[in-house]
Amino acid sequence: MVKPFLLFLGFMMLQQAVQAQFDIAGGSITGNFKLEAQTYQEDSMIGAEKVAEKMRSNSYMNLKYSNGNFTAGIRFEGYLKTMLGYDQGYDGFGLANRFASYSGELFEVTAGNFYEQFGNGLILRTYEDKDLGYDNSLDGARVKIKPINGVVITGIIGQQRLYWEKGEGIVRGVDGEFSLNELIPGLDSSENRFILGGSFVSKFQADEDPLYILPENVGAGAGRLNFSRDGFILNTEFAYKGQDPSADNNKIYKPGSALLMNTNYSQSGLGIMVQYKWVDNMGFRSERGAQLNNLNINYLPAITRNHAYAFAAMYPYATQIDGEAGFQTEIFYKFKKETLLGGKYGTQVTFNYARVHDIQRKALDSLTVIGQDGTDGYKTNFLSMSDSLLNQDINIEITKKLSDNWKVILTYQHLDFNQAALQGHGGMVNTNTVIADISWRIKPKHTLRIESQVLFTDKADFAIDSLHSVKIKQDYGNWAMLVLEYSVSPHWFFALSDQFNFVSIDDEIAKNTFKYVHNGDDFHRNHYYTVAMGYSKGASRIQMSYGKQREGILCVGGVCRNVPAAYGFNVSISSTF
Amino acid sequence: MKKMIVSVTFLSMCVLGFSQGGTQTIPSVDLKTMDGKTINSSTFSNNGKPMVINFWATWCKPCVLELSNMAEIYDTWAKETGVKVIAISIDDTRSMARVAPFVNGKAWEYEVYIDPNSDFKRAMNVPNVPHTFLIDGSGKIVWQHTSYADGDENELYEMIKKLAKGESIK
């Protein structure tokens, strides 16, 4: 327990330092840091492994110097060694990011590492997310020019970060955005607001393939329109990519394309959103052979709800860059105070529905199989949709304040998840999940939050032989969870939680079959408990927890990583200064 | 690990060693309005009165709880101190289309902007949401807070009241 104590000591000193922005030659230095460490114990029941180092740690620190129009920054990152569940290629410690930028009236120039997004990101988005271990920053130069009001032109060139190295490919791009109401006289007072944008991105990588003649320069273009009027907003973008045989598409020469449409309407107390997306062969990376989350040039958002509750997010959907067609709609409504359904404080209801299918693919001719490398792969019609359902998510959430001290959020979700197509194992998983999240303000500053969740999977036929089949629970079966969280504002936080796996077994045959499907483990009545506490003051926070972590997939913004089962002690400290 | 503790402790001592200038101001970063227009953060102002900048996301439960709790008393805050709350959503392309219906569906009255690639979040050194900054009448960041527990808004309001009276919050 010495380590946590030392960390705590360091933390106490640090929180003294909050707001100690200090002056150097008239400028100021600001920054932040986060340090996380985890010990690993073995637990064969849940599949948790120990590591030779006993503990592992991920950390970073940003330092930024700004003076007038000038800013420069560096970031140290340390992975000693990389915590389990993150890409192990990060092992090491060093300077991961450095940049300098100058912003004047007319233009802004950045040299070094930078993050940029053109439009919705369909052909270019570099960003970082520490929770995912994701960083595809470009190292090079960026110029942003604002010649007149309503016009922004951005040009970029660079190579992308790959762990501690850079990817081989060179990425170049230009984007222009034009706000018509500011540009066209007479439109400035119009209630119809128009913004147009267009971008072009190209990557270069030498062709050293022994078999195929590969395009060394691959270009992609996108155009977008944003229209708004009286609470109505339409945002749409179409992207097209030239021939780009790669590991993503099994080296087919077919060009790619994508369409994204977002519309919403809202007024006080009511909001409606509809999204549509179609993707065909749009993997775009600065190295042809890159896999996992490496060297992505573009970003294709998953248009399903980004769930915050653990069980609603148990089977997360991620965009299928090879092809998908889907839509999502969401309605927000507030029943006003002093109405039948609104009661004394009003009631908030959110309904969300999303459905995604695969696209339709036809063989090029009778001799070529679909997706054959070295060919155009397949034929598809623009906006085509196949019968193959990938994901369907229906959920409703009701938020209700019962009294000055009681508040409840109720959630129901039905999910159909094509695990075979999306994760390469199992079949269809159909789940029903109910969540009750209750807050009780015991006295001012003291609040107890009780979160209970339960998830049921359906039963499916499993063929034992050609004549007999048995009904068994899909995937790992049912789950229940209870979280108790006690917070004392503004500093303290304590939590206890347990996740519990249970499978209703009809008979011995079903039990043995379930065990067989899961390679001998019956995953039956496993508990995943955690105790946690946190202390925060100002912009600093320390959090410690001990317990077991379920194997699963963690997703942020539609990008996911696998989290292995883990058992041990975790501490994290963060601060902004 | 030991190395890290030593370096962290050393750094915090360094930071303590410097004079407490409190000169950090709002960096200049392009953001989006909910209907897609570009707006620069350097234009944020509240005519010499205090301002709160809150980083949140539609998928972040504590963020939504914080903004919902503040929404109930925002009228009173604004009346008593003239404070303005600016809510910066870090929802990216996946969920940014939710922001306008989400905010209006809850009838929040904050000024809301979207930071779709987290540029402003990075410039303000925010590690995670929710994260709240308090800005004084001259545009200086005078206080900040990370995470949210039920009731934290009262601590924030004590600071706002002090600022509105022209007192130092140190």
Image (cartoon, rainbow, N blue to C red):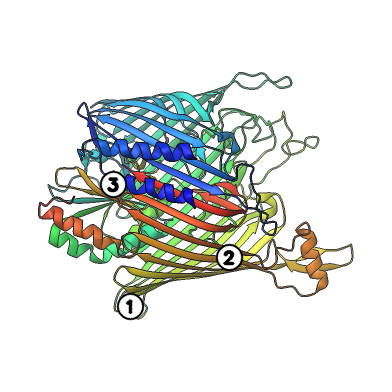
Q: Nearer the viewer, residue A221 or A247?
A: A247
Which is more foreground, mark 1 or mark 2? 2
Mark 3 against mark 2, which lies toward the viewer? 3
Q: In the rendered structure, which amino acid carries the disc numbered 1?
A: Ser
Element type at mark 3:
helix
Residue A301 horizontal/vertical position (percent): 50, 45
Residue A101 position in % (x across, y down): 32, 26
Residue A326 located left or right of residue B152? right
Residue under circle 2? A499
Residue positioned 43% across, 33% down in the render: A76
The foreground one among A222 and B152 is: B152
Q: Secondary structure at mark 1?
A: loop
Nearer to me, A116 or A335: A116
- From the image, tell me which residue sits under label 3: A16
Amino acid, disc 2: Gln
Q: Chain under label 2? A: A
Q: Residue tagged by mark 1?
A: A403
